[in-house]
Amino acid sequence: MVEHADIRVVHRGGSKINFRAPVISDDSRLLLCASGECVKVYSTSTEECVHHLRAHTDVVTGVVLRPSNHLQVYSCSMDGTIRLWDFTDAILIKTYVIGQPIYSIYASAQHNGMFHLVAVHLQQSTEQLVEARELSVVISHVSSNPAAIAFGRAGEYLASTKGLQLEVFFLKKQKSNRFSLKEENKKGRKNTFSCVTCHPTDDCIATGHEDGQIRLWRNFSHKKEYTYSTLHWHHTTVGSLCFTPEGTNLLSGGVESVLVQWRYNQDTQRDFLPRLGAAITHVTVSPDGTLFTTTHSDNSKSCYTLTAQALLICLYCSRESIETDLLIDPRSKALVMNGKPGHLQFYSLQRDKLMYNLDIVQQEYIYQSDLQQFEVVKAAFNSSGNWLATVEREQKDAELELNLKLWAFDDQTQSFVLNTTISAPHENRITALCFSPATDSQTTTVLVSSSKDGHFKAWQLTYLQYEGPCWSCDFVGAYHGLVPSCCCFSADGSLLAVSFQEVVTVWSSASWELLTTLSQPPGDIRDLCFGQLSCSKYLLGTSTSNLLLCWNLLTCSCKITAPLLMYTSLPTFAVIAASFSSLLSVFVFKPSEPRPIFSQKAVCSGKVMRAVFAPREEMLESCEESSQWLNRCQLYFLSQHMDLMTFTTKAEEDKLMDSSKQLVIDDTVAMTPFHLLLGKRRKEREDSARPYTAGLPMSLTHVSSPSQLLQTPAHVLPSTSYLCSMFVRSLLISVTDNRSVTQYSYSTNTHSSAFTGFILHGSTSVPK
Amino acid sequence: MASFKPTKIHVYPKLGEKVTQDTLYWKNYKAPIQIKQFGAVSNVAFSPVAPYNFAVTAFTRIHIYGPFSQEPIKSFTRFKDTAYSGRFRSDGQLLVAGCEDSVVRLFDVGGKTALRMFKGHTKAVHLTDFTSDRYQIVTGSDDYSCRLWDIPNATELNTYREHTDYIRCGVTSKLNRDLFITGSYDHTVKLFDVRTDKSVMTMDHEQPVESLLLYPSEGLLVSAGGRFVKVWDLLKQGQPLVSLRNHHKTVTCLCLSKNGERLLSASLDRHVKVYNTTNYKVVHNFDYPASILSLALAPYDESIVVGMTNSVLSIKHKKSPSESKDSTSQQRRRPSYRMFVKGKNYIPKQDDFLVGKQVKEHLAKHDKQLKKFNVSKALDTALESWTRRRKPEVTVAVIKELNRRGTLKNALAGRDEQELSRILNFLIGNLVDARFTLVLVTPAEMILDIYRSIIGQSPVIDRQLLRLHELLERELDYQRELLEVLGMLDTLFASSLPRNAVECSGISSSNGFFLTY
């Protein structure tokens, strides 16, 4: 097997962003969050990812703004380093090496010229403080949870919780007070601390507990005379606590996915922001107090303004198990998989962004620890993307509730609309779902579902006279009472292959006749797929005995049995079959040839969860034999850490790099209407002034506008007489410019609306 | 922040007929008016002139009803025995009726006593009709003969003795005064021409003929007898056209709708079937509570009159156009004038940013409670009597939602006698409904669990629990019987299926492989 140097595995998106609390920049325009080995910088207004801060070699465990410079940020990582970044331009400024894994980082605003760092090494359980690269232990025995430590008012003290103990360390006096709670109070609730935060202007520490209580500690500088009050709304663990910058409100969130806002000192008043989608893991407030950010356990992030309306950022939900497999929406070329509970998410591969969530179950999501929810377990698109079939399942003790839903694409709303719901389509869980490929518009689309109850059913679109199209069962098939495991249509839709444990049956889709059965070496069939284009005569399958099988349907003979340690599904596209072996290698086969045309070892760390072939929007013209399979499609796969990876060639990557450099976002000036008008004027002036200065030396060409003239040091300027004439001339230009505008306004004075149209037109051209 | 998703109420498919133009047409009748008669209603005949009164022959009386009155506007009671076949003349002035005592009586519709009595038959006369020239009467009797009478002289003109059994039905041609057709229990239908002494055409129905009907064009003849309805082409020498077998008991009466497009047949099996006369497919079906003896349609299908063996006359009137419109579309309330006018003429400019009015989400009562997690109150609102009776699927959906949330037990617990009996009532009413059984079994079990300790304290609850118990026992028996029938049917089907092995390209695939449609 040959290694191919020019094809490489590239990270294309995904990854967790809910690992640590995000940080909002001082002007509330950028949002930084740790994501795997890099820090992602998002714009809060456009929701786009602006920069990736890449340098760490292990998981980034903390991000914190530098108190002395609001344009810089520290990040710490498990690789034992702390790095200082200029996040607006994504420049690495400094690297501090600690040498031990760092779990979290905190900074205090009052200690100028230095930063405090609390690093916890799990084995030694020590806490270290670095001042100008010197380490000193502040508190030992701290929790590795970053929410368990917080700086108090003006950085005077440090609160740390672990287990049942709250420790307050006064940095000036270098002494600490410890307060511990009883293991269980009277009602048998757990008192364990889950998070802590300190009031920004008052001596008050708020702690969250596992029983859902929030305690506000006061007077804690005394060992004995301390007091606390209790707030209770959450019914299980308080996930995150946060004071607003002025300290007027306290925000808390937990698994209920409700953001609770408590009025400070008015304990009875509280506001709720319910149904945020998933359990809240972190709540942060921007330094100017205008934005709240909540991070959720499903890897989404939302920003809310104080009026609590706008959902600004919602990113790529990732789940523990993706039951629907990865699908490609033929219409939008988006990646489709399980999203929020009961939803399907459509995720744009090109932009690494969640497009939307489609509500499949249409039921109110209620969090409760042992509550069974409806789960979307299977989904399938037809070849044109007009129809989407989904299967949802609720397993409650012995009862199984299944729903098969068919969604039609609505051109007007540009989304899927529920067409037919079939409750209890099968008596047992559905193992596979596939649409027949529509070769032309006349043939009706057929959906085939196979189930563990030993039957497979064909569903057909029927047109009722008064109710429009809907789906009904057309055929029920079985074979010797065996359990069907997967089904697949041939490229022209004429054949249906259904595997029954060890046997593959081939049916004619026109008459539902059993045409032939295919046998194979022992082992149940796990996956089935027909070849496409020139290889459409081949049927491919994998079995539990780790074999890749290929049948030639013209001769009904088994052609290749390649002994491979198969472990993930093998999707096929064009003439390609790719397979993942347990050695984490990728092999790409042509069905007609027994030897792989491409192989790569160790594609990523950890298991490969799912893989899918996505068609390219434009074909590549690579002539090399080894990379030809990438011409028509791309193989995307999802690693254990929810990283989305793909294979690219070097040439393509270079092209992408070039295009990304062109994409510069000018965020320096806020886009107010005032700016739009003035900016336009200024820009015009600059543009028009340039031709007149063309005759000047290069160093002077920039001295064109009056403001720049004044800013330039006097000793580098040419003689005043020369400048004077230029200055006057530049003014002349602006006058003519104005005149043109006024002329225009005169000519269009009768239609005032046209005039506004002109100004708005000018304003839209400015940002470019 | 997502909005609250209301409880999903399952839409259960309506079983039964598809909605076609025919069903819409034939369903467009009001609820039937039922009038009790003195005996089985053997004949209903409409007057051919407005206001389209109809004569109902029942036992020894003939009543004439107006189109909308429920009381007879006229009755003829001077019969010595059971009267038969009261029919109007084409001008609606005269009415003729046969009788068990073999005398045929002719009445003036305005008068009381018989104008003429035609004596000559020796047995009961079941068929009487006027010829199209209005001066003669055709009668058929159980003495196997049919006779032609002259009205002005009250004399017998001719006697035809060709049938060999009772003559029970007949029809005269509306276009030719010389033709009439009789049907007899000797299985034959005969066409007579007055100008000759013999029948000119004989058709074999193969069953005792109960009713005859001529198409308005008089090219086709419909005969009913036994379970069969047969159509004959008279222009092709009585060639049989179709034989319809849609009833499972004797067909007793035939009728045509206003334009001859639909044929109606009534039978002892209590059904009236409506056929399309182009393809003779059944397009609609009416059910009646008893065996039907007579059927008549008013001109323009304004009403359907059916007489039954249980001596009930059932009259269905067509809904007036305004009534039928009301039922289909309820008018929505218009917004108030002020709301209507405000900003009405404002046209947004091209660059305007439109701020849409926030649509206030409307939640059902039970959803409002569910949103606040008030589980008991949610169940209470779902069990309100109107919802419980009219829309049990809403109640079931709420119970299902509570069960999904794991709070059904909380919602059911802590009820007093009245509330508990309401829940039990609902369970008794809907537990055996196949659509709801799966959902309702859980609350029934929970109620038994929760309230086991208080059984015996309240007679109301105890009675209801006993009823529930009985209901379940009955349902179990019923299900067992059904399974038995299914098993029997399976064996029947299995034995009747041909056993020939299918050869399938060298692989035998016939055994164990079956198809179900």
Image (spheres, rainbow, N blue to C red):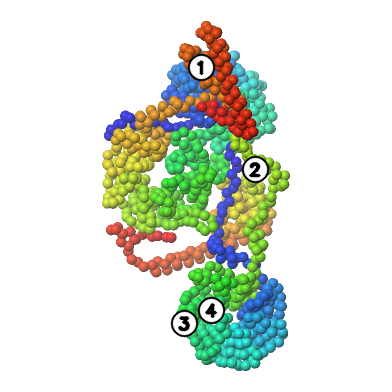
Point out the frontmost of discs 1 and 2: 1
Quadrant location of residue A457? bottom left
Q: Which mark is residue B218?
A: 4
Q: Is residue A85 left or right of residue B109?
A: left
Q: Circle 2 is placed at which residue position?
A: B360
Label 1: few (<14), some or many (≥20) within 10 Å?
some
Label 3: few (<14), some or many (≥20) within 10 Å?
few
What's the chain of the residue with tag 4?
B
The Cα atoms of the two marked residues, 4 and 3, are separated by 13 Å
The Cα atoms of the two marked residues, 2 and 3, are separated by 75 Å
**x and y, in percent, of residue B258 in the image:** 59, 72
Q: Circle 1 is placed at which residue position?
A: A692
What's the chain of the residue with tag 2?
B
The residue drawn where x is 61% and y is 35% is B352
What's the chain of the residue with tag 1?
A
Q: Is residue B55 visible?
A: yes
Q: Are marks 4 and 3 on the same chain?
A: yes
Q: Earlier in the sequence, mark 4 or mark 2?
A: 4
Q: Is residue A73 visible?
A: no
Q: Are marks 2 and 3 on the same chain?
A: yes
Q: Name the one closer to the observer, A764 or A467.
A: A764
**x and y, in percent, of residue A125 in the image:** 49, 22
Amino acid type, callout 2:
Lys
Q: Secondary structure at mark 2?
A: loop
- Image quarter in which the N terminus of chain A is found: top left
Q: Circle 3 is placed at which residue position?
A: B237
The Cα atoms of the two marked residues, 1 and 2, are separated by 61 Å
Q: Secondary structure at mark 3?
A: loop
